[in-house]
Image: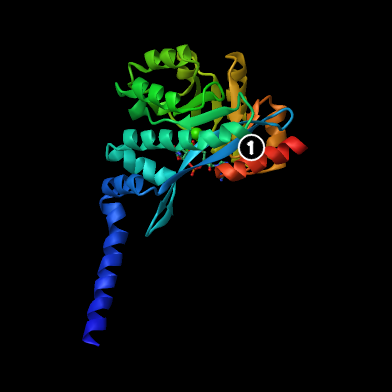
Amino acid sequence: ALLTGLLFSLLVAAASWLLLSLHQRPGREILLGIKRGQFHVEYQPLVTAQDGRPYGVEALLRWTHPVEGMIPPDVFIGYAEAQNLIIPLTQHLFSLVARDARFLSQQLPRGTRLSLNLSPLHLASCDFRHHVQTWIAAMPADHFNYVFEITERTMVGEKGAGEVFAWLHDNDFKIAIDDFGTGHSALIYLEKYPFDYLKIDRGFVQSIGTETVTSPVLDAVLLLAKKLNLKTVAEGVETGDQAAWLVNRGVTHLQGYLFSRPLRPENLIHYYQSQARL
Ligand code: C2E
Ligand code: CA
Ligand code: CA
Ligand code: CA
């Protein structure tokens, strides 16, 4: 009885140590997670607004922690940025995508847009270009059209942002401004930097048909995007009403659960196949 009691308390101690360790030492847990293959990538389709046809995919990182289960990227990306691990984590993302791409490129049409999210910290690092080149060398040649998604905060205080963007364009990468409308002093960046896509934040999309106050803002943003010749992607589209409203306003691409959730590669291929049959 004494032994089982001892074993039991040991077990409880071990479990609580594991539970605590993620939040107390997230950096160590992320590194372990990379080493132990706990991360994978899901791909969420984007469709062309006019005909609903698949246009491309956004890669979204997933972490299954052995104790805590699925940890949302909003949480672990924040940890990674705070612990100076966003660069190794993004390099891991690159290698996971390159691994998936060998299989995906045999099934997805040539020219499929492949979007990856980048952290501003990575973009500003001097190794960034080298990391991108290394990644592309590991990707199937001439198959995907690449898009990097970055948030507005990237531009704040980044003197070199313009230069990096020019380099990306010289190398055939497109740039999307992500979560548009959620940061500060947003509009000025649209003129200043050569974005190709503007991604309308889910918050805006979800307010369609519910809060009349947000519609004028969204209207203004869409008008501006059109004037600046940007493609627009509405994210978080969940209802047919939202989609109809957005298409009516000239949004060029849609993304959201209405079309598909983020999918593992096998399921993404099924999605493409089912769309091709329509
Ligand atoms: P995001 O870039 O704005 O990604 C879109 C998020 O909206 C994703 O959440 C996606 O699953 C979710 N979403 C898409 N359609 C719908 C919908 O119809 N309804 C709802 N409720 N949600 C929808 P996720 O995957 O949890 O990612 C959250 C954020 O974490 C991302 O926001 C992005 O900022 C960050 N993130 C994810 N993966 C990466 C990554 O590989 N690198 C970096 N730097 N950030 C990442
Ligand atoms: Ca994004
Ligand atoms: Ca977004
Ligand atoms: Ca977001």
The picture places residue 257, in percent across and down from the top left corner, at 62, 44
Query: Could you say which is closer to the camera, residue 25 or residue 205?
Result: 25
Q: Residues within 10 Å of mark 1 (few under 14, many from 20)?
A: few
Classify residue 244 as left or right of residue 35: right
Residue furthest to the right: 278
Classify residue 70 as left or right of residue 109: left
Query: Could you say which is closer to the camera, residue 275 or residue 255?
Result: 275
Is 28 placed above or below 146 here? below
One can see residue 181 in this view: no
Please give the name of the residue rendered at 44% of the width and 17% of the height, measured from the top-left corner. 168
Residue 68, quarter of the rendered image: bottom left
Is 16 placed above or below 55 here? below
Q: Amino acid at mark 1?
A: Thr
One can see residue 276 in this view: yes
Q: Quadrant of the N terminus?
A: bottom left
Is 19 placed above or below 72 here? below
Residue occupied by mark 1: 212
Please give the name of the residue rendered at 62% of the width and 34% of the height, measured from the top-left corner. 107
Q: Mark 1: is the Cβ under 8 angstroms from ligand 1?
A: no
Please give the name of the residue rendered at 43% of the width and 23% of the height, measured from the top-left corner. 137
Q: Tag count in the figure?
A: 1
Classify residue 66 as left or right of residue 201: left
Query: Could you say which is closer to the camera, residue 244 or residue 185?
Result: 244
The picture places residue 244, in percent across and down from the top left corner, at 72, 34
Q: Determine the secondary structure under disc 1.
A: loop
Residue 211, quarter of the rendered image: top right
Query: Could you say which is closer to the camera, residue 258 or residue 239?
Result: 258
The picture places residue 153, in percent across and down from the top left corner, at 39, 28
